[in-house]
Structures are given as structure tokens and as C-alpha cells.
Amino acid sequence: MSSKKMSVGDPIESRCTKCRKITNHIIVAMTDDSPARVECNTCKGQHNYRPPVARKTPATRRTVDPKVAQQKEWESLRPSLEGKRPTAYSMTTAFKQGSVMEHPVFGLGVVLGSLGPGKVEVLFEDGKKKMRCL
């Protein structure tokens, strides 16, 4: 397969700055053996030669289901709850981070932290909940 030497007036593919895509162009000026300036056949705009580059495909993101992540977090904290005695949940009781609570509906939970005055975030077996307290 022989490669033809490029010269002024030959057609070539290039990224057009006006069209914003790869289009056919005509070589207008050369430097040594490579095209320097080209003219777009679509919009007739002249610009420096920009070789066509294949677009990168964006990496696929793996989304993590929050329920699955909370379930894994619960499983990792479960062994540390064995020796602790849970406090019955009441809105008039103060809870601090790391304390264990027993809720009548949600069951056993671990206080993850405070969300401001009168609120704590608690991790139960079925997920995180925001609870009122002192």
C-alpha cells in the first residue's frame, strides 16, 4: 500500500473550530510534510490543522445503593453491640455518639452522631433514621 504525499489542495479530515466536529477540509498551507492550515468544506472557515481525535467514552459509574451501604455498615457495627446495654428510646432522653438505643418499632440502633440541637442520626438494621431527643 503506497502512501501519497500530501500537498496544498488535497482533502483531509480535521476537527473544525466553527462546526465543532470532525469534517472534511482542504489543505491551504503546509509546513514541511504536515498540513498547517485547512479550510472546512462545510462552513468554509479557515483554521490551523487539528487532527481528528477519537472521543473518549466516559467511564461508567457504579452507583452504590444507599440501603446496601447502610446494611454493610450495620453488619460491621453489629459485633461491637454485644457487650453494650441499650437505652430505651425516649424523646426526653439525651443520646451521645456511639450509644446504643432500643426503639419500639425499629429495634436496636447505634447513634452515629448529632444533627444539631434535639436531633441525632441513628443506624438501625433497616437503615439510618433521624430521631428527636434532648
Image (cartoon, rainbow, N blue to C red):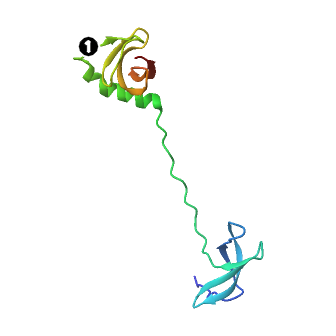
**Residue 117 at what x, y percent from top left?**
43, 24
Q: Quadrant of residue 36?
A: bottom right
Which residue occupies the extreme bottom position in the image? 32
Report whether 46 appears left or right of 70: right
**Residue 107 at what x, y percent from top left?**
38, 13
Residue plotted at (41% across, 31% down): 69
* Mark 1, residue position: 85
State whether residue 34 is above or below residue 103. Answer: below
Q: Secondary structure at mark 1?
A: loop
Residue plotted at (62% across, 84% down): 35
Which residue occupies the extreme left position in the image? 83
Viewer-proximal residue among 30 and 90: 90
Q: Quadrant of residue 75?
A: top left
State whether residue 59 is above or below residue 51. Answer: above
**Residue 44 at what x, y percent from top left?**
77, 76
Residue plotted at (72% across, 70% down): 18
Residue type at tag 1: Arg
Q: Residues within 10 Å of mark 1 (few under 14, many from 20)?
A: few
Viewer-proximal residue among 60 and 10: 60
Viewer-proximal residue among 38 and 124: 124
Report whether 16 appears left or right of 86: right
Q: Is the N terminus in the top left, top right, bottom left or bottom right quadrant?
A: bottom right
Q: Quadrant of residue 4?
A: bottom right
